[in-house]
Image (cartoon, grey):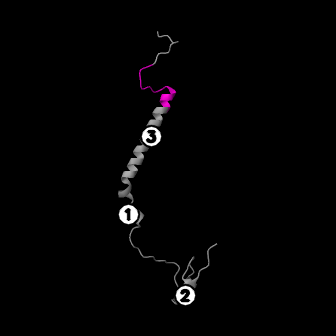
Amino acid sequence: MAAENSPSTNEWHWFDATLMAATLKAAPLNAAFILTPLSGMPDFLTRTPPESHIGYAVTWFGMAAAFALIYAVFHARAGRLRFGPRREDKGATRE
C-alpha cells in the first residue's frame, strides 16, 4: 500500500537502504541506525502550560458552577431542596 520511491525526484516513502545508497553514490547504509538532528523541543510543548493556564482554570471552574446549578435544579424540582419558606398543604393536618 506504500507509494513507490522516486529517487529522481528525491521522494522516499519507505526506507530502502540499497536504493538510497546507490542514489547517493555512498557506501551501503546501515539500516540499524537512523539519525535525525535535534533542534530543540517542538513549539507545542514549549508554549502549552503558560499560555493556556487561565483558560483551563476558567473551563474547570465554569464546569463546577454548571454542575452545581444542575444539581440544585434537579433537587429543587424533586422537592428535596427549597429556597423559600415551607408551603402548607391545605388538606394536611398538623399534629
Q: Pointer 1: what residue?
A: 46
| Quadrant location, the N terminus | bottom right
Query: In x, y percent, where is residue 78?
Result: 51, 27
**Distance (Cα) linking label 3 and label 2:** 63 Å
**Distance (Cα) linking label 1 and label 3:** 32 Å
What residue appears at the point 46 percent right and 39 percent down from the top-left corner? 67
Q: Secondary structure at mark 2?
A: helix
Q: Earlier in the sequence, mark 1 or mark 3?
A: 1
Query: In x, y percent, where is residue 35?
Result: 46, 77
Q: Where 14 falls versus 58 (above or below)?
A: below
What residue appears at the point 58 percent right and 82 percent down from the top-left corner? 6
**Distance (Cα) linking label 1 and label 2:** 38 Å
Q: Earlier in the sequence, mark 3 or mark 2?
A: 2
Q: Is residue 92 magenta?
A: no
Q: Pointer 2: what residue?
A: 23
Q: Is residue 78 magenta?
A: yes
Magenta range: 74-86
Marker disc for residue 79: none
Residue 69 lies in quadrant:
top left
Between 28 and 53, which is closer to the camera in this rendering? 53
User: Is the residue under label 2 in contact with that under label 1 (CB below 8 Å)?
Assistant: no
Query: In x, y percent, where is residue 21?
Result: 54, 86
Side of 25 relative to 54 (left or right): right
Q: Pointer 3: what residue?
A: 66
Q: Amino acid at mark 1?
A: Thr
What residue appears at the point 48 percent right and 32 percent down from the top-left corner? 73
Query: In x, y percent, where is residue 22?
Result: 55, 88
User: Is the residue under label 2 in contact with that under label 3 (CB below 8 Å)?
Assistant: no
Q: Dot 2, how many residues are within 10 Å of its Cα: few (below 14), some (14-19), or many (20+)?
A: few
Q: Secondary structure at mark 1?
A: helix
